[in-house]
Amino acid sequence: MHLREIEVQARLFSGVYGSRWKTTRGEMVEVVHFGEWNRESGPDFKGVRFRFENGEEKNGDLELDWDARDWERHGHATNPAFSSVELQLFIAQPDEAAFARTVDHREVAQARLGIEGEPVSKFQSVPQPVDLDTARVMIDEAAEFRLRTKQTAYASASSLHGPETALFYALAIGLGYKNNSIPFLLTAQRLGLRDAGSQVGEALLFGVAGFLEPRNFDDADEITRRYLKPLWDHWWSVRDTLSRLVLPSSIWKFSGLRPSNHPHRRLGALFALVRDFDKLRVAIRTGGSDGFLRFFETLSHPYWSHHWNLRAAKLDRPMALVGADRAGDMLVNALLPSMPLEAARRQLTSLRGPYPSGRVLKACEWLVGSDAPVLRRTAKDHQGLLQLFSDFSSMTALEAWAKIRGASFNL
């Protein structure tokens, strides 16, 4: 299954794919700043700051296409709106050469954007397990690779947007979890840390997410109406101006979720987080990982600590806004990548592994023929098993081991 173009744009903007690429001419080009994400017709990113291999810096636009040939297919070559494009990034490269030129016949630099495919859902049907010692080496090397990859992505996001915004994006992804990570990232990107954490940030978050609709207000009980009214009042005063930022409803996933993971509640948690972002920074600075986890233990919201979603009745008792498991996951995937490598390694090794997911259990069975708790004791173990699942699930364990020995993950 292909990623949608809007998902690729979100990951590109947040630094997941880095900021330096080799053009089809063999020269390096770097995005120093992504400028403005364009939601109107025309190039995807406008006012981008580029640095080329010869040291020259230019301001211009950036276009992202799925196929290199889309420049011609979509009529960019004859559209004056694309005359300031300095770089076309593309994902699929055809066998035949494809060129990009503007309406005034200026050549546009092109570079292929390498993106990770979706994880393979099934393991090799004929198991060929390895011994525990070999499995341990594979897990350790995969965990190291995964950590370095995340640190590279964080460093890129920090360089492009600043360290606080990079952390904000990573935390938003964590609150979206696997089902809604991209919608949460898009919501965070479209508002930014300052606006999301402002006095009207909650109204903006729910409005841009597309959750402030008349039916949500009309069908609500009295408690929910009192909560929604100030959000509603502000959003409807700015809705026309911000309508181009509102996410399509089709991007959200609501089915198959635990009640506590409902996007409404998670978005309320995101607002509570950015509302107290200064407290989070102090907690990290003074307490490190422990301070980070303690912050989420005390995080609360007058409405969302008592509700699952905008249509649910009030809970009998308050529930943690962000549970311990989710906070631990965000620690591993958002905070540790921002730390120095050696410190992050120590943390991963010392953190106890969470309750094993289906992918972790399948990876254990694929590696050694059965579930092996000894291989999933720490957070580092879980990270390594998840990376193996993602990279090698279409191979046998022995084939994966042979590939690892040959490549050593290029560490």
Image (spheres, grey):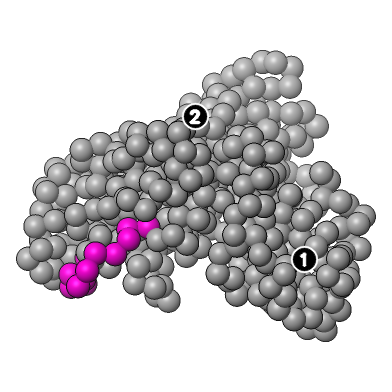
**In this rendering, position of residue 6 left or right of residue 234:** right
Q: Does the magenta stretch include residue 311?
A: yes
**In this rendering, position of residue 159 left or right of residue 164:** right
The image shows residue 113, relative to residue 46, as above or below, that is below
- Disc 1 is placed on an element classified as helix
Residue at x-position 64% and y-position 39%:
343
Determine which residue is flagged by label 1.
392
Q: Say what amino acid the circle numbered 2 marks.
A: Gly
For marks 1 and 2, the one nearer the N-term is 2
User: Looking at the image, which is closer to me, 13 or 376?
Assistant: 376
Determine which residue is flagged by label 2.
162
Viewport quadrant of the C terminus: top right
Residue at x-position 40% and y-position 48%:
294
Across and down, in percent, residue 13 comes to 52, 40
User: Looking at the image, which is closer to me, 133 or 263?
Assistant: 133
Residue at x-position 69% and y-position 60%:
381
Residue at x-position 70% and y-position 64%:
385
The residue range painted magenta reads 310-322
Q: How many residues crowd mark 1 within 10 Å: few (<14), some (14–19), many (20+)?
A: many
